[in-house]
Image (tube, coloured by chain):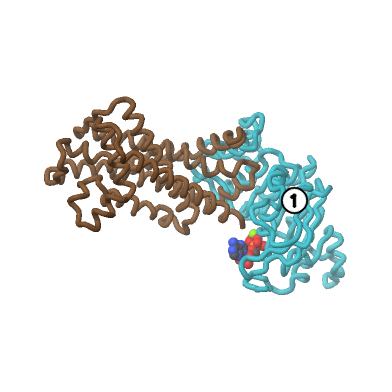
């Protein structure tokens, strides 16, 4: 990115971060549903779930809760982008001699910051609910990198939704399937407890790989093959969503 | 070199052929008014000039730069205040202006913002969120945002729609000041007296082309002075406009 583009991106990120600071409820609402789910699973259903491992249930399911946090957090990015598109701000920005990519990157970087805060909130509550990690500093860094990559990839998916939506509700509707996807993965129950066809899907969808990687890093069992599967999925998704975002942006703004 | 040169411009939305060969020349430092009924294509033309829309055919030069091949230079040459407010309602009025001033790389953004707030009578409301502004205040903030950076060409799409008479006169005053300082202003308007008051030249956009263009005096010559009244009265621009455009026929919904 050129220094001019960085300058514009910095300004537009500051602008959109201000939106978050002015309505911190967006971060709270992002965190509150996953937190409620976590408490529900740990203290209500947890006793009936057999994960087939010795770890406590909160340790087992936290990775899935983190993915749900991200999936609901990125919906705000499509919402804000949709508002820019519909309220004329996009026209103003496009009429300025600024870098066009900075218009999208401002929203994307804001999403990374907002989701990081939500994730920290959720992890904090998890600790209160009894979550304990055996992870080394390096493991934690790998966890952070995985969560960051997941947020980035899903944020670009959110950008596509925000640019193409026709209504406010449409802008965030894409996140519902994303929020449900962890339930058909290894996030809450082992996949071998599922009916055959469902288990096959669960074992081959990206959330399972990501959740397995996060879980093995957090429990200090180091990296296994799932980390490479996760990396491949995330890089692929990131490339596809980013590319498609730029394509949709160019199309939507060509006139 | 002209501030704006448009040759044979065509633009359609699907099968609605809005602009059908528009030719237009705006001289630097002048105030140029574009008149047209609702749906005539004024906003479309302004958006093509500011590179927000692309032309289907024809050539559009802004400050000598081609909108199709040198959009970046075109954007550096102009600033646009569109027909509908383009404001970040979560930010305060001042923050909106500061954002624009920084994006336009003003050496002293704070001062640029404060000067514009003062000029548009928004100093008191400066630190309130723009979403709390009245319609007229929003319009004034929008106009102020369009002046950040002092571009040589200012495009104003219906600048005074929704303003009270006092703000309207104030805005006229600012537009005259802009022109006096050498800025070219192209404005569209529904108010014929606005064009009469401000414009050096006036163009009437109708059925996809400029059907008349000239100074107010030129346009006056198109109609004989009315003689019905006891004292001979010059036709107002409104008389001329209605005569040229005919009864309420608009191209809305017209297909090519
Ligand atoms: N994005 C679009 N898609 C389809 N049709 C459009 C689009 N934008 C404008 N039009 C149509 O093109 C015609 C010209 O619209 P435009 O907004 O340029 O007119 P205008 O002269 O600015 O009108 P007004 O005085 O009401 O602002 C109208 O018939 C309008 O319905
Ligand atoms: Mg218009």
Q: In this image, B186 relative to B95: left or right? A: right
| Identity of the residue furthest to the left in this view | A48
Query: Ligand 2 lies in which image quarter?
Result: bottom right
From the image, state the color of chain A: brown
Q: Nearer the viewer, residue B240 or B37?
A: B37
Q: Measuring from the top left, give residue A210's x and y in whole percent.
A: 32, 42
Q: Residue at x 74, y 46 (%)?
A: B153
Instruction: Relative to A31, say whether A194 is above or below.
Output: below
Tell me the element at label 1. strand
Q: Which residue is the site of mark 1?
A: B66
Q: Residue at x 58, y 53 (%)?
A: A253
Q: Which chain is represented by cyan in the image?
A: B
Q: Measuring from the top left, give residue A70's x and y in whole percent.
A: 35, 43
Q: In this image, B215 relative to A101: left or right? A: right
Dot 1 alpha-carbon crowd within 10 angstroms: few under 14, some 14 to 19, many 20 or more: some
Q: Measuring from the top left, give residue A168's x and y in whole percent.
A: 44, 55
Host chain of mark 1: B
| Identity of the residue furthest to the top in this view | A137
């Amino acid at each position: 990115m050129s220094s001019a583009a960085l300058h514009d991106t910095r300004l537009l990120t500051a602008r959109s971060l201000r939106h978050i600071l002015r309505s911190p409820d967006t971060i709270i609402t992002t965190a509150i549903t996953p937190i409620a789910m976590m408490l529900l699973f740990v203290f209500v259903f947890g006793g009936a779930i057999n994960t087939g491992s010795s770890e406590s249930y909160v340790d087992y399911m936290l990775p899935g809760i983190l993915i749900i946090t991200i999936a609901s957090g990125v919906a705000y990015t499509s919402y804000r982008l949709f508002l820019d598109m519909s309220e004329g701000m996009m026209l103003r920005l496009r009429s300025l001699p600024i870098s066009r990519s900075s218009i999208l990157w401002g929203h994307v970087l804001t999403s990374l910051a907002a989701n990081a805060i939500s994730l920290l909130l959720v992890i904090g509550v998890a600790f209160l609910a009894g979550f304990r990690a055996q992870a080394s500093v390096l493991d934690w860094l790998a966890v952070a990198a995985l969560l960051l990559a997941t947020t980035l990839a899903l944020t670009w998916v959110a950008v596509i939704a925000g640019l193409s939506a026709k209504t406010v509700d449409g802008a965030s509707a894409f996140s519902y399937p994303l929020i449900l996807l962890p339930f058909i993965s290894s996030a809450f129950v082992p996949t071998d407890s599922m009916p055959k066809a469902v288990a096959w899907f669960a074992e081959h969808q990206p959330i399972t790989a990501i959740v397995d990687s996060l879980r093995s890093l957090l429990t200090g069992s180091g990296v296994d093959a799932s980390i490479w599967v996760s990396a491949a999925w995330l890089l692929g998704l990131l490339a596809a969503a980013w590319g498609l975002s730029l394509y949709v942006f160019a199309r939507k703004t060509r006139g | 070199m002209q501030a704006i040169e448009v040759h044979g411009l065509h633009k359609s939305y699907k099968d609605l052929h809005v602009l059908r060969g528009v030719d237009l020349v705006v001289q630097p430092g002048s105030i140029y008014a574009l008149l047209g009924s609702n749906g005539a294509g004024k906003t479309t033309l302004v958006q093509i000039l500011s590179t927000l829309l692309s032309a289907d055919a024809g050539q559009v030069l802004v400050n000598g730069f081609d909108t199709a091949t040198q959009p970046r230079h075109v954007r550096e040459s102009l600033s646009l205040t569109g027909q509908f407010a383009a404001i970040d309602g979560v930010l305060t009025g001042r923050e909106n202006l500061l954002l624009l001033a920084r994006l336009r790389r003003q050496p002293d953004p704070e001062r640029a913002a404060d000067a514009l707030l003062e000029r548009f009578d928004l100093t008191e409301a400066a630190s309130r969120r723009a979403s709390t502004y009245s319609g007229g205040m929003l319009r004034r903030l929008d106009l102020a945002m369009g002046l950040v950076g002092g571009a040589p060409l200012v495009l104003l799409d219906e600048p005074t729609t929704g303003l009270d008479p006092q703000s309207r006169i104030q805005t006229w005053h600012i537009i005259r000041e802009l022109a006096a300082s050498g800025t070219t202003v192209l404005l569209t308007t529904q108010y014929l007296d606005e064009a009469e008051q401000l414009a050096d030249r006036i163009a009437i956009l109708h059925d996809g082309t400029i059907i008349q263009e000239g100074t107010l005096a030129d346009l006056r010559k198109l109609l004989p002075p009315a003689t019905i009244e006891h004292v001979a009265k010059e036709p107002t621009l409104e008389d001329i406009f209605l005569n040229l455009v005919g009864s309420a026929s608009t191209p809305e919904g017209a297909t090519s």
